[in-house]
Image (tube, grey):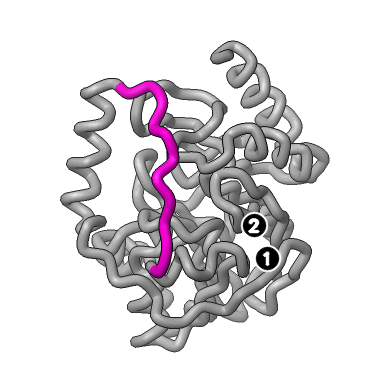
C-alpha cells in the first residue's frame, strides 16, 4: 500500500517492510521474513516496477524478522545489504542474543508465532554478505537514506531517515503494536537487549523533521518524531 508518494508499505502491523520509490530506482528498508517475497512482487507489479530496480536493502538492525528476503535480493538481483557494523554478524546469522521477553499474553503471542510460520520466518536464509555502515552515513541509494544510531534494542540498531519521502524508519527502537501483549500505541519494544539504553537513544530522533514515524512492528504513525518519543517515554514511565 502507498502511505505517501514514493513511500510504500508491504506486510502488515505484525511485521512490515517499506519501499522507497524514485525515478532513479528503489530502496528497501528492512527485509521482513521470507514469505514477504510474494507481497513485494505484488506491490512491484502494482506500481509497474521490478525487483532488479532495488539497488539496496537497508536494515534497521540484524534480527531475523528484519532480514528475511535480503539474501534473495542480494544473490539474485545484486542489491547490496547495508547494516550497522555492530549488527553485521547478527544479520549474517553468526551471533544472536536472548533478551528478556517481559509481559506476555497468550493470544498476541500465538498470533505472532502463527504469522512467523506462515511467512516462513523460521526457515531464514541470512545474507551471506553485508555492507557495514555507521551512524551518520548517507547512503548512495534512491532517497539518500541517512543513518541515525539508536543502540539499545541491539548494539547496531539505527533509524533510517529519508527526508525525500518524509519518513523516519525506527525498526525496533520503539513499537506501536506490541507483538507479545497486543497493546497499541508508541511504547518500548520487546526483545530489547538493553532497554535503558534504547530509551535514552531516542533523544537522537526527537528533533528530526519527518511526517511519518515507522516502526518494524505496529502501525505507521503520521506524527512528529518528538511527539512519538514523548509518548514512548511516558509509557515507559508508567511501566516502572
Q: Is residue 239 magenta?
A: no
Q: Which residue is drawn at 58% across and 39% down?
A: 194
Q: Where is mark 2, residue-wise? A: 160
Residue 153 versus residue 94: which sits nearer the camera? 94
The segment highlighted magenta reads 94-104
Q: Is the magenta stretch mostly helix, strand or loop?
A: loop
Image coordinates for residue 176, horizontal then vertical, percent:
50, 31
Q: Which residue is drawn at 22% across and 41% down?
A: 113
Q: Which quarter of the figure has residue 134?
A: bottom right
Q: Which residue is drawn at 66% across and 38% down?
A: 197
- Name the disc covering residue 145, or none: 1
Residue 199 versus residue 18: which sits nearer the camera? 199
232 is higher (above) or lower (below) than 173: above
Q: Which quarter of the figure has residue 100?
A: top left
Dot 2 falls on a residue whose secondary structure is strand
Mark 2 Cα shell of 10 Å, populated few (<14), some (14-19), many (≥20): many
Marked residue nearer the N-terminal end (2 or 1): 1
Image coordinates for residue 101, horizontal then vertical, percent:
39, 32
Image coordinates for residue 108, horizontal then vertical, percent:
27, 27
147 is higher (above) or lower (below) than 199: below
Residue 27 versus residue 124: which sits nearer the camera? 124
Dot 1 falls on a residue whose secondary structure is loop
Mark 2 to mark 1: distance in Å?
A: 6 Å
Image coordinates for residue 170, horizontal then vertical, percent:
59, 47
Amino acid at each position: 500500500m502507498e502511505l505517501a508518494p514514493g513511500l510504500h508499505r508491504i506486510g502488515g502491523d505484525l511485521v512490515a517492510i517499506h519501499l522507497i520509490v524514485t525515478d532513479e530506482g528503489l530502496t528497501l528498508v528492512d527485509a521482513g521474513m521470507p514469505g514477504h517475497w510474494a507481497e513485494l512482487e505484488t506491490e512491484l507489479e502494482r506500481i509497474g516496477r521490478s525487483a532488479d530496480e532495488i539497488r539496496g536493502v537497508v536494515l534497521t538492525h540484524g534480527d531475523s524478522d528484519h532480514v528475511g528476503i535480503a539474501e534473495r535480493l542480494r544473490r539474485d538481483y545484486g542489491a547490496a545489504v547495508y547494516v550497522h557494523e555492530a549488527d553485521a554478524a547478527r544479520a549474517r546469522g553468526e551471533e544472536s542474543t536472548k533478551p528478556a521477553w517481559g509481559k506476555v499474553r497468550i493470544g498476541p503471542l500465538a498470533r505472532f508465532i502463527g504469522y512467523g510460520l506462515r511467512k516462513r520466518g523460521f526457515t531464514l536464509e541470512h545474507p551471506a554478505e553485508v555492507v557495514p555502515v555507521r551512524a551518520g552515513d548517507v547512503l548512495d541509494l534512491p532517497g539518500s537514506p541517512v543513518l541515525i544510531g539508536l543502540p539499545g534494542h541491539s548494539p547496531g540498531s539505527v533509524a533510517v531517515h529519508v527526508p525525500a519521502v518524509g519518513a523516519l524508519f525506527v525498526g525496533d527502537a520503539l513499537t506501536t503494536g506490541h507483538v507479545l501483549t497486543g497493546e497499541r500505541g508508541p511504547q518500548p519494544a520487546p526483545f530489547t537487549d538493553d532497554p535503558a539504553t534504547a530509551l535514552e537513544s531516542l533523544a537522537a530522533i526527537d528533533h528530526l523533521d519527518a511526517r511519518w514515524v515507522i516502526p518494524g512492528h505496529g502501525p505507521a504513525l503520521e506524527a512528529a518524531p518528538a511527539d512519538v518519543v514523548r509518548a514512548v517515554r511516558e509509557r515507559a514511565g508508567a511501566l516502572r
